[in-house]
Image (tube, rainbow, N blue to C red):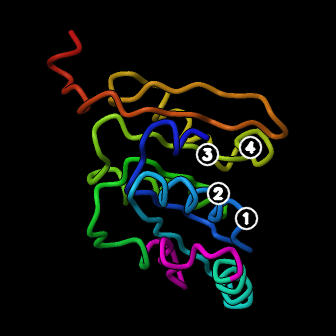
Amino acid sequence: MQALASGAKNIVEFGTSYGISTLYLAAAAKRNGGRVITCEYLPHKAAAARKYFQEAGLADYIELREGDALETLKDLDIRPDFVLLDGWPDLVFPVFKLLEPNLADRAVIAVDDVEGFSPAMQDYLDYVRRPENGYISSTLKPYKALEYTIKTGKPKRSSENR
């Protein structure tokens, strides 16, 4: 819903798994005239996801990259305007920091299971909850919680915070 409502065209997902979330993101990307770049570390999950993408008729809107997200998400040719971080909890912050320099203005970042995997995601939460870093963020309380973050602008330098 959020990817569709925000008009997201350049969607990035960390943690494809079997592709359920990817299909929803791809449906939004199709309607918004965009695409999804997603990554999955485990080959058997990536193979199953590709099958589901074909069956759903959305494969043309999805680029699935296999392997370590810190490698497969380098050098993106897009400025992500919607990001779903739903992969290995210990990698959420490093993947976010990899994507951060290229995030579009007002990009939406959704992180799943932020309470279910504490303290693994605490560094991410501490960072995006500090407005001086250029974000506003709130925790939504479905099962294991979801952190919903919006990029508000460039981080303020320490001299601007006085």
Q: Secondary structure at mark 2?
A: helix
Quadrant assignment for the C terminus: top left
Badge 1 or badge 3: first in the primary sequence? 1
Mark closer to the observer (3, 2): 2
Relative image position of residue 40 (x, y in whole percent)? 61, 77
Badge 1 or badge 4: first in the primary sequence? 1
Q: Is residue 72 above or below residue 83?
A: below
Give the residue at x 45% y 57%.
11
What range of the chain is rendered magenta? 55-70
Mark closer to the observer (1, 4): 1
Q: Are marks 3 and 2 in contact (CB under 8 Å)?
A: no
Q: Is residue 24 above or below residue 60?
A: above
Q: Amino acid at mark 1?
A: Ile
Give the residue at x 37% y 60%.
98
Relative image position of residue 33 (x, y in whole percent)? 38, 58
Badge 3 or badge 2: first in the primary sequence? 2
Q: Are marks 2 and 1 in contact (CB under 8 Å)?
A: yes
- Label 1: few (<14), some (14–19) or many (≥20) C-alpha neighbours in 10 Å: few
Q: Secondary structure at mark 1?
A: helix
Q: Nearer the viewer, residue 4 or 126?
A: 4
Give the residue number, with chain letter if any, for mark 3.
111
Distance of label 2 from label 1 (alpha carbons) = 7 Å
Badge 3 or badge 4: first in the primary sequence? 3
Give the residue number, with chain letter if any, for mark 2.
24
Looking at the rendered structure, which numbered label has been put on residue 118? 4
Distance of label 1 from label 4 (alpha carbons) = 24 Å
Q: Nearer the viewer, residue 45 or 3?
A: 3
56 magenta-colored: yes
Give the residue number, with chain letter if any, for mark 1.
20
Badge 4 or badge 2: first in the primary sequence? 2
Which residue, as the protein is rendered here, is positioned at the far right? 143
